[in-house]
Image (cartoon, rainbow, N blue to C red):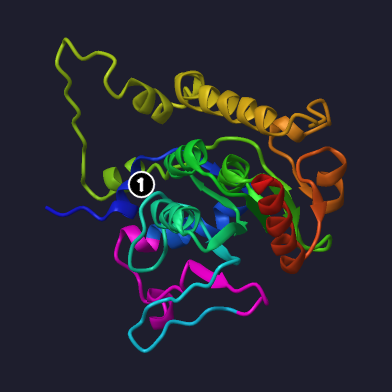
Amino acid sequence: MKVNKIASEILRGQWFFQSEAINAYAPIAYDFLYGNNKQLRVDDARPDAVFTAYNSSGNPIRPNDQGQLDIPKGSIAVVDCVGVLVKYGDWCTYGAIDIVNALEFADAHPNIIGTVLNVDGPGGSVAAVGPFVEFDKNKTKPVVAVCDFAASAHLYAMLAVSDYIMADNNISAMIGSIGVVITWMDNSKYLEENGFVEHVIYADESEDKGKAYHEALKGNYEIVKKDMLSPAAIQFQDFVKSKRPNLKVDHPGLMTGKTFGADEAVKIGLIDKVGSMAEAKQMVAMLSEIKRK
């Protein structure tokens, strides 16, 4: 049986996700899992390209008649990291692996001097962060992030790969939500009322298998928090601190999941400045020039 990768990620995953967004996205995830996709429009199945190259004059480079990109020297790539972040892409979205492939392509291309990572999203799967962390270990060219909404997993990924971080405005831009959450629907009462009774039998030698899950169903969340959520949250906090050395770590709410407007995010050292996409490209060019010296 072929299992949809996004469905698997939704069912098994922990999430770096803005809590306020859960109620908005949970019904979409439910419909996706259980085949109620009538609300998806045809154009939803064809996401825009994740990668765009711009020449030194700032004009986008279009494919030629053969569908190939002739990228001139001094070009800058723009890679989109938009929407809920999942590890694997599918027919309706690009995944972290697709986005990182675009980052790697730009980093390896001899005529591209650096990349702007365009970030806008409420977070995503914990599993989606790893590819960005691995990319950062080997990248050779500057990456400047420009964001409108960078919460949780998007913040994690942005911090992982970026040499400089900007918010594209100080009106709607929100940055933060450093935290981890697990949520699921307990349908056991519904199933029981409809005649379904579940029997789960473990080997005597497997007493810890599924223990956290079954204890949580009873209302005991301590094992889930201790073994799953807290380690991931602490790792997230430590990663943010390592990437932002001037961060005001004692600022109220910063390390406990609060989301901040752009101006406050600059003041506490979570991002570097507020600026436009054009300014982000200028920063890429400047960092590239410094790197060459």
Front one among 215 and 191: 215
Position of residue 15 measured from the top left corner of the image (x, y, whole percent):
49, 41
What residue is shown at x 65% (from left), y 72% (from top)?
56
The residue where tag 1 is placed is: 9
Residue at the front extreme, as displayed: 293
Find residue 68 and report its horizontal and vertical position in percent. 37, 78
Quadrant in the picture for residue 67: bottom left
- In the rendered image, residue 58, in percent from the top left (x then y), is placed at 66, 75
Q: Is residue 117 left or right of residue 67?
A: right
Crowding at mark 1 (Cα within 10 Å: few <14, some 14-19, many 20+): some
Whether residue 128 is visible here, answered yes or no, is yes
Comparing 31 with 289, the one in front is 289
Residue 82 in view, yes or no: no
Q: Determine the image quadrant of residue 241.
A: top right
Specify the farthest residue to the bottom: 65
Query: Is residue 47 inside the magenta stretch?
Result: yes
**Which contiguous range is marked in magenta?**
31-59
Above/below status of 136 relative to 92 = above
